[in-house]
Image (tube, helix red, strand yellow):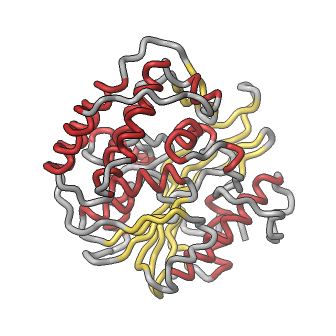
Amino acid sequence: MFEAAFPVEERYDLWRLATFTLNKRIPIHRWFYFKEGFSRDLVVMLLEELGLAEGCVVLDPFVGSGTTPLTCMELGMKGVGVDASPLAAFVSIAKTRIYNHEELRRALDTLLSSRPSQPSLEGLGTKVKRAYPRRNLVELLSLREAIEEVEQEDVRIFLKMALINAASKASYIFRDGSVLRFIKRPIPPLRPFFRRIAQSMIDDVRRVRFSSGPATILEGDARRLDSIEDESVEAIITSPPYLNKIEYTKVYEVELELFFKKREQDLIRSYIGLVGREAPRVIEGLEELPDSAKLYFSDMMDCLEEMWRVLKNGGRAAIVVAGGVYPDRIVESDYILAGLAREIGFTVEKIRVIGRRVATSGRVHRIGAARESIIYLRK
């Protein structure tokens, strides 16, 4: 079931599209740097390849920083996004609202002309305190309090997004793969940093014109898409967390505590969500895999079943995945997930390999090459 019994196409020229790098130059897409995300250009390509027209409903059940629904708004489609992380869900909501740039500018001026408060640092976690110079942390909490008092929901969301963006840049935070580190260095004051970022974001709002929207963004679990009706979406474009690669909640735990009152111990993770399971489903053919891989594919089986449920007949999906690297093996996620999808009832149209990285053990012994691929499915 999990061998390469599918059409396979190699397009290594597309590897950069599966990174967030290209989004850093695009208005609104650049509001929050999400290293694990893919690019707007990839979504544009996939929307065209899947044959979607204006008005189609496109779902991303691992919405991340909102690239899929935001791109859909630009092209006149209805974007729907779901994510288990409150941070990711909020960032996606903030990027996919319809704003009035003049109203935002007035609100920013009012906010910055108000007298700063002197909030207490009592009760904050150790990592939050380590992440900032004291003056910046006080300014951050003061601005956060003022933004929470803003009555207009869209304005409040926008200003909170600007503060999250500024707080990340005016800090000692360094995200080193799956490790959150703090590096002491000269850091500019947060308040003027916030002003520049918010003004730049307002300029983005002024320049961008949407053909549809706002998108529908939900905080939820891709294994249980309870808020989405059966056979209600035309297409799915998504990228689940890669097997055995990064711990998504740990590297954003400062933002989760500061802005969502969540600490790491509150976020019980499964291998693809924030709610664990007691035991994996038993999937024939996966008995020899490491336990973490069994759990991952067990969760992904649930996700694929939900994708099948919500897709209309004839609906299509494009799923960006990558192989898992273990000390003694490469786990070929694309072949396994394609096999699981076929077992559920999907037609696997093809697997397009867009990247390949050499994996070693102890930096000496070559284990193999892990593929990054797009799986194309049809219901």
Residue in the foreground of this view, choosing between 218 and 342: 218
Asked whether residue 22 appears in the rendered view, the answer is no
Q: Residue at x 63, y 32 (%)?
A: 125
Residue extending furthest toward the top: 186
Q: Quadrant of residue 153?
A: bottom left
Asked whether residue 240 appears in the rendered view, the answer is yes
Count of marks placed on residues: 0
Q: Is residue 341 left or right of residue 119?
A: right
Q: Residue at x 47, y 56 (%)?
A: 89
Quarter of the N terminus within the rendering: bottom right
Is 173 situated above or below 14?
Answer: above
Q: Is residue 21 left or right of residue 289?
A: left
Is 28 situated above or below 273?
Answer: above
Residue in the foreground of this view, choosing between 219 and 209: 219
Q: Quadrant of residue 200?
A: top left
Is 344 situated above or below 355?
Answer: below
Is 245 situated above or below 67?
Answer: above
Residue 379 rendering spot, x and y as whole percentages: 52, 82
Residue in the foreground of this view, choosing between 287 and 92: 92
Q: Is residue 327 left or right of residue 376?
A: right
Q: Residue at x 61, y 59 (%)?
A: 334
Residue 250 rendering spot, x and y as whole percentages: 63, 39
Residue 279 rendering spot, x and y as whole percentages: 83, 64
Residue 227 rendering spot, x and y as whole percentages: 52, 76
Q: Is residue 291 left or right of residue 63?
A: right
